Image (spheres, rainbow, N blue to C red):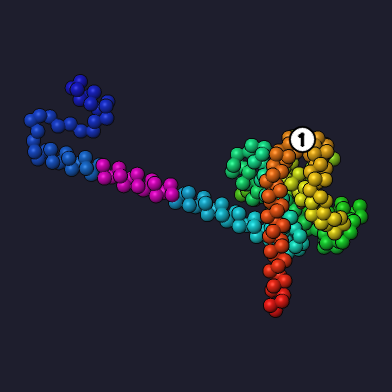
């Protein structure tokens, strides 16, 4: 009896007592083989289910990314400069997030959500959005509404990616010293994603030509941002931005090459037609 208890405790599932009866032996063996087979099938089924869940999650994620991409495209139709701007801002933001040491998937989510930071511009009248030249005070106030409009468009989504996009849309014009908009948040109260995108957005706006100003040189823009650490920008994010500069320069160069290619394609298309 004590041997049986010890064997059960050790994981035995069956016993044969000597002398062994061949018929009983065969029946017991068949039971054990059937049990092993049932266990194997169960494990296979569990593995199949796990793979199906992974696949469904991946598909859901891809759809979320596609929605973001298509919304960004829609905004790009209203203002063609916006499409390239948003993509560069996304890549700069990811580079800063990486230098801040954020987890890999968070950096990726910031890259995916950042292109929508200006989505609220769809709610701004064209006379203001596309105006060539400096905005009046009243027009500037109208333009500022894009942060709140963007947040309103995105915030009620159940998708965590769209919620992050809403956070960025709402916070990317807040300033570290509390003098930004729309909510005059200050310091750490501003979501980190917004503080990151704010730097990327300003860097891109300054280094590219706008209707009211020429493109600033790279060095001047970097210095401008460094000078505003602690007033306009989060100093920790500015430090990460400085570390990210080699990657940021790579992104700028790649963008320059892509634009040159697009222009060449357009000219070839025009001469072919
Ligand atoms: Fe903006
Ligand atoms: Fe922007």
Give the vertical position of 112 relative to 24 (above or below).
Answer: below
- Give x and y (percent) for residue 126: 82, 63
Is residue 40 inside the magenta stretch?
Answer: yes
Mark 1 nearby-residue class (10 Å; few <14, some 14–19, many ≥20): some
Asked whether the viewer can see residue 55, the reply is yes
Q: Quadrant of the C terminus?
A: bottom right
The residue under the point 47% across, 49% down is: 53
- Give x and y (percent) for residue 98: 64, 41
- Give x and y (percent) for residue 175: 80, 40
Residue beneath disc 1: 235
Work out whether residue 115 or residue 185 is closer to the camera in this orientation and state it: 115
The residue under the point 26% across, 45% down is: 37
Is residue 169 inside the magenta stretch?
Answer: no
Give the vertical position of 84 relative to 172 (above or below).
Answer: below
The residue under the point 69% across, 74% down is: 269
Q: Residue furthest bottom?
A: 273
Work out whether residue 234 or residue 116 is closer to the camera in this orientation and state it: 234
| Ligand 2 closer than 8 Å to label 1 CB | no
Q: In which quarter of the image is the N terminus?
A: top left
- Give x and y (percent) for residue 45: 36, 48
Which element is circle 1 on?
helix
Q: Residue furthest top?
A: 2
Magenta stretch: dominant secondary structure: helix
Asked whether the viewer can see residue 185, the reply is no
The number of numbered discs placed on residues in the rendered structure image is 1
Which residues are drawn in magenta? 36-51
The residue under the point 62% across, 42% down is: 106
Judge from the rendering whether residue 136 lies leftward or rightward of residue 270; answer left or right: right
């Amino acid at each position: 009896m004590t041997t049986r208890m010890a064997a059960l405790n050790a994981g035995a599932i069956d016993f044969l007592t000597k002398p062994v009866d061949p018929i009983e032996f065969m029946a017991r063996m068949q039971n054990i083989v059937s049990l092993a087979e049932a266990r194997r099938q169960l494990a296979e089924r569990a593995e199949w289910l796990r793979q199906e869940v992974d696949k469904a999650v991946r598909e859901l994620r891809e759809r979320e990314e596609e929605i973001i991409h298509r919304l960004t495209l829609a905004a790009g139709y209203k203002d063609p400069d916006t499409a390239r701007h948003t993509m560069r801002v996304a890549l700069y933001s990811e580079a800063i997030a990486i230098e801040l040491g954020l987890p890999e998937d968070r950096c990726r989510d910031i890259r995916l959500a950042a292109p929508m930071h200006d989505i609220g511009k769809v709610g701004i009248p064209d006379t203001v959005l596309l105006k060539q030249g400096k905005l009046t005070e009243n027009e500037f106030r109208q333009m500022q509404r894009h942060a709140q409009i963007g947040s309103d468009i995105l915030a009620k989504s159940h998708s965590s990616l769209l919620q992050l996009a809403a956070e960025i849309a709402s916070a990317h014009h807040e300033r570290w010293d509390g003098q930004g908009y729309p909510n005059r948040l200050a310091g750490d109260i501003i979501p980190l994603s917004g503080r990151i995108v704010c730097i990327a957005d300003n860097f891109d706006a300054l280094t590219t030509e706008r209707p009211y100003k020429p493109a600033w040189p790279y060095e001047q823009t970097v210095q401008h941002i460094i000078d505003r650490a602690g007033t306009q920008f989060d100093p920790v994010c500015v430090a990460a931005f400085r570390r990210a500069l080699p990657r940021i320069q790579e992104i700028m160069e790649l963008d320059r090459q892509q634009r040159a290619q697009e222009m060449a394609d357009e000219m070839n298309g025009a001469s072919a037609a």
